[in-house]
Image (cartoon, rainbow, N blue to C red):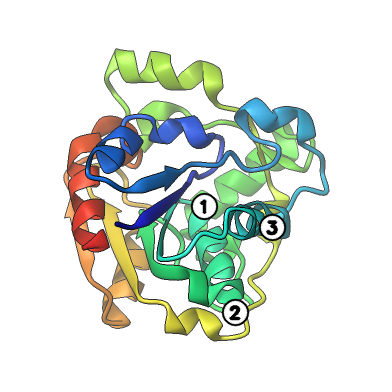
């Protein structure tokens, strides 16, 4: 049986996997879904100093503290950067890394560098004008492909602004990450901000799975996503 570590993206917390984790556990797997520093129920720890390294350390400490091995490390959206850095630091603990509609960055690349130009401009402008220069305000869920009112009502109270520094910090890789097999899951029923990342994955020979849902697959298509993750774990 595998151990899943599910890492959420911007604005979210570990709770966003609550519709996926029970399905993975029912199949006999161990599941961890940490909330990254400064987000959601850990928003009281937010400061302008919280960056990519902070979030990488969150996950590395989880792996080390519980001596986790044979980990299927899943990162959604922004957390693709976290997954890449963690796998580079702890390659022997990771059996597979999975990018769920997520950034596929190389050494020296920041998340900001990987956004489409129009999206990057909007995020930078939002941080400057509404986020005091260091926060990215929560985006409208409809833009992310969440349309069911019950899903909107479940997500909205829990989402919090995200530290912009995490998008500015570049990856600092040794190359060890390349030893860890990878896969990509693209959500295709929305504006497809991560389409170029999926193409990058294909060019690298990674398996790429497409889900007919919006960006928040763990909320809007938990059963289909769970099936893909279980297949990748096998």
Q: Secondary structure at mark 1?
A: loop
Query: In the figure, is residue 93 to the left or right of 97?
Result: right
Point 66% across, 56% down: residue: 61
Q: Is residue 223 above or below residue 185?
A: above
Horizontal side of residue 3 vs 185, given as left or right: right
Label 1 packing within 10 angstroms: few (<14), some (14-19), many (20+):
many
Label 3 SS? helix
Cα distance between the residues tagged 1 and 3: 15 Å
> Mark 2 or mark 3: which comes first in sequence?
3
Q: Which element carries disc 2, helix, strand or loop? A: loop
Which of the labelled discs sits on residue 107, or is there none? 2
Between residue 21 and residue 12, name the one nearer to us.
21
Q: CA distance from mark 1 to mark 2?
A: 16 Å
Badge 2 vs badge 3, beta-carbon distance below 8 Å: no
Residue 192 at x, y = what percent? 32, 51
Is residue 142 depicted above or below 71 in this figure? Answer: above
Residue occupying image coordinates x 29% and y 23%? 147
Q: Quadrant of residue 126?
A: top right
Q: Is residue 173 above or below residue 58?
A: below
Position of residue 185 measured from the top left corner of the image (x, y, whole percent)? 28, 57
Snapshot quadrant of residue 27: top left
Tell me if I can see residue 76 in this picture. Answer: no
**In this rendering, which labeled residue sits more in front, label 1 or label 3?**
3
Residue carrying label 1: 78
Residue identified by numbered label 3: 57
Residue that appears at 39% across and 54% down: 3
Q: Is residue 199 visible?
A: yes
């Amino acid at each position: 049986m595998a151990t899943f570590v599910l890492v959420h993206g911007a604005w979210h917390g570990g709770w966003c996997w609550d519709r996926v984790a029970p399905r993975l556990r029912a199949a006999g797997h161990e599941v961890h879904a940490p909330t990254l520093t400064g987000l959601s129920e850990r928003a009281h720890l937010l400061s302008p100093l919280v960056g990519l390294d902070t979030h990488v350390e969150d996950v590395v400490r989880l792996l080390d503290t519980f001596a986790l091995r044979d980990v299927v490390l899943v990162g959604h959206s922004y957390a693709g950067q976290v997954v890449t850095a963690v796998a580079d630091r702890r390659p022997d603990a990771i059996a597979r890394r999975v990018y769920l509609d997520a950034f596929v960055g190389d050494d020296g690349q920041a998340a900001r560098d990987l956004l489409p130009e129009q999206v990057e401009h909007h995020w930078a402008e939002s941080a400057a004008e509404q986020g005091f220069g260091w926060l990215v305000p929560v985006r409208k869920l409809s833009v992310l492909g969440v349309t069911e009112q019950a899903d909107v009502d479940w997500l909205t109270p829990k989402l919090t602004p995200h530290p912009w520094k995490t998008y500015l910090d570049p990856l600092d890789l040794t190359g060890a990450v390349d030893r860890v097999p990878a896969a990509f899951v693209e959500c295709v029923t929305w504006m497809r901000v991560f389409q170029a990342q999926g193409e990058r994955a294909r060019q690298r020979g990674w398996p790429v799975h497409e889900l007919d849902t919006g960006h928040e697959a763990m909320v809007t298509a938990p059963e289909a996503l769970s099936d893909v993750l279980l297949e990748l774990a096998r």
